[in-house]
């Protein structure tokens, strides 16, 4: 093993240690730590005991009988806890897939869930590092190290994004390196079943790319359907009206005052783990969902349409696949509800960034600068320091939502611009040198 490769591996290992340590400390010190997982855990157990998890009263009653009670004080933490745990926003497929873990006692289930997230994300990071381990191991190692140390919330929150992002990235590496294809299909199918708005854009790329990649996308979709059918039947038996109830729960979270509302008066979308969709920025101009949703769809719809057309026309190429994914990963986080932990999909931007950097010149420097900014501004450490320094003052939480969506938009547009100019005959770095 060369010294450069060994250095890159050391950075990956050190980053993994920091990731686990920071995530564990954040979970230990945050009174709302693991509440996202607690919601899934309680809902899955609720179904298993033949109650409706999408009905607030039934879920609350089951939780009280199952655990012996809930926090009774009227603090902000307690009110937030109730909104997170007892308003179920997860698909039946998520509850179905989590059922084996939910059958365990809480203390064992939470440990197993944290181990799965930690192991999955570290494996995803290793897979991406392995892509560039021969060409630029130190650069890959440094970028992934920065990603790891900024991802503690991924572990401490317990949100399914921690597992879904990891599975989606692993699937991409399997497909693009043409190794462990069956494992990649299973990973992508499970990710689609749990969080389609995270894994869906990745699946769409392989579908549009054609050839054997389209076949793998269709196989993943078929396996997702195979998971969906028993999951819906399982939930329907206990909750025959689950679909309208789930829709109502999602609408309540997005309504003014809801935890997932993008408006400036909703504290659930601010602070660490903030909402990173473009609506959070536009709502500062006019706090009206009809306004900021419409403008967001126009701003994001045009580049996404260009991306789809380009992918259909150019087809699949290993040289351009990473660039296509580097463009779609940030762009699709903007029009729909996403939080900072979903932005760990930026792992998919690392190979394109490294390749452009090795090509040199202004675009290489721009790629590195934008990727670094996106990792930092959608990560944890910068915001932890800022909010602690400002004591969560109004200006820091309100205007702190501006940088992350804007840098994601800039990175997505930049990668899309390069993608629209790419071809199938040269590598990204080789093309950069040729054009200069």
Image (spheres, helix red, strand yellow):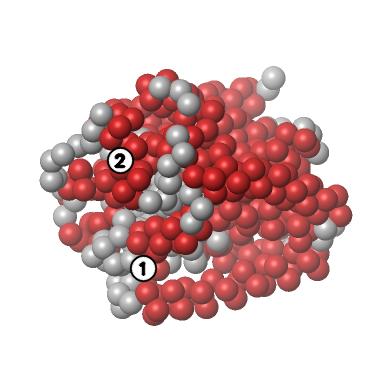
Q: Residue 434: x percent and y percent? A: 77, 59
Q: Quadrant of residue 366?
A: bottom right
Q: Quadrant of the C terminus?
A: bottom right
In this image, 118 relative to 259: left or right? right
Q: Quadrant of the N terminus?
A: top right
Horizontal and vertical percent position of residue 362: 58, 60
* Residue at disc 1, secondary structure: helix
Above or below, 143 against 55 in this view is above
Q: Quadrant of residue 248 in the image?
A: bottom left
Q: Please tell me which of labels 2 and 1 falls first in the chain.
A: 2
Judging from the image, what secondary structure is the residue with disc 2 in? helix
Label 1: few (<14), some or many (≥20) within 10 Å? many
From this viewpoint, is residue 28 visible? yes
In the image, 353: left or right of 223? left
Is the residue 66 above or below the residue 172 in the image? Answer: above
| Residue 394 horizontal side relative to residue 22, left or right | left
Q: Is residue 333 above or below residue 98?
A: below
Mark 2 = which residue? 61
> Relative to 293, is 331 on the left or the right?
right
Is residue 163 or residue 431 the one in the foreground?
A: 163
Q: Position of residue 432 (x, y in %)?
A: 71, 58
Judging by the rendered image, the residue that carries numbered circle 1 is 281
């Amino acid at each position: 093993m060369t010294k450069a490769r060994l250095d890159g591996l050391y950075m990956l290992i050190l980053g993994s240690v920091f990731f686990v340590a920071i995530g564990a400390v954040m979970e230990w010190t945050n009174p709302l730590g693991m509440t996202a997982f607690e919601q899934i855990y309680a809902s899955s157990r609720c179904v298993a005991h033949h109650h409706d998890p999408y009905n607030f009263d039934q879920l609350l009653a089951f939780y009280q009988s199952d655990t012996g009670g809930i926090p009774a004080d009227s603090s902000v933490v307690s009110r937030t806890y109730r909104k997170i745990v007892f308003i179920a926003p997860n698909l039946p497929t998520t509850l179905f897939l989590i059922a084996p873990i939910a059958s365990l006692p809480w203390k064992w289930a939470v440990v197993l869930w944290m181990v799965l997230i930690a192991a999955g994300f570290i494996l995803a990071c290793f897979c991406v590092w392995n892509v560039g381990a021969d060409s630029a191991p130190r650069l890959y190692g440094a970028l992934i190290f920065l990603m790891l140390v900024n991802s503690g919330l991924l572990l401490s929150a317990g949100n399914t994004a921690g597992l879904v992002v990891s599975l989606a990235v692993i699937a991409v590496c399997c497909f693009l390196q043409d190794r462990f294809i069956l494992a990649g299909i299973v990973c992508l199918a499970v990710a689609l079943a749990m969080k389609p708005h995270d894994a869906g854009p990745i699946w769409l790329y392989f579908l549009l790319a054609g050839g054997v990649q389209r076949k793998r996308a269709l196989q993943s979709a078929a396996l997702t359907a195979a998971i969906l059918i028993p999951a819906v039947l399982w939930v329907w038996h206990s909750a025959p009206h689950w679909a309208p109830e789930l829709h109502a729960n999602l609408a309540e979270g997005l309504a003014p005052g809801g935890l997932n509302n993008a408006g400036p008066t909703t504290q659930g979308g601010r602070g660490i783990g903030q909402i990173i969709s473009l609506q959070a920025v536009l709502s500062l101009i006019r706090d009206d969902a009809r306004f900021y949703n419409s403008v967001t769809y126009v701003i994001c719809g045009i580049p996404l349409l260009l991306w789809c057309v380009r992918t259909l026309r150019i087809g699949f190429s290993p040289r351009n696949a990473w660039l296509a994914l580097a463009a779609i990963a940030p762009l699709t986080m903007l029009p729909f509800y996403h939080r900072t932990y979903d932005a760990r999909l930026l792992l998919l931007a690392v190979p394109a960034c490294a390749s452009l950097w090795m090509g040199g010149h202004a675009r290489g420097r721009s790629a590195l600068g934008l990727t670094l900014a996106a990792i930092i501004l959608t990560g944890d450490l910068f915001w932890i320091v800022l909010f602690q320094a400002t004591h969560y003052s109004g200006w820091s939480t309100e205007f702190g939502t501006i940088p992350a969506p804007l840098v994601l938009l800039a990175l997505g547009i930049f990668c899309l611009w390069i993608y629209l100019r790419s071809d199938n005959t040269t590598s990204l770095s080789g093309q950069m040198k040729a054009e200069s």
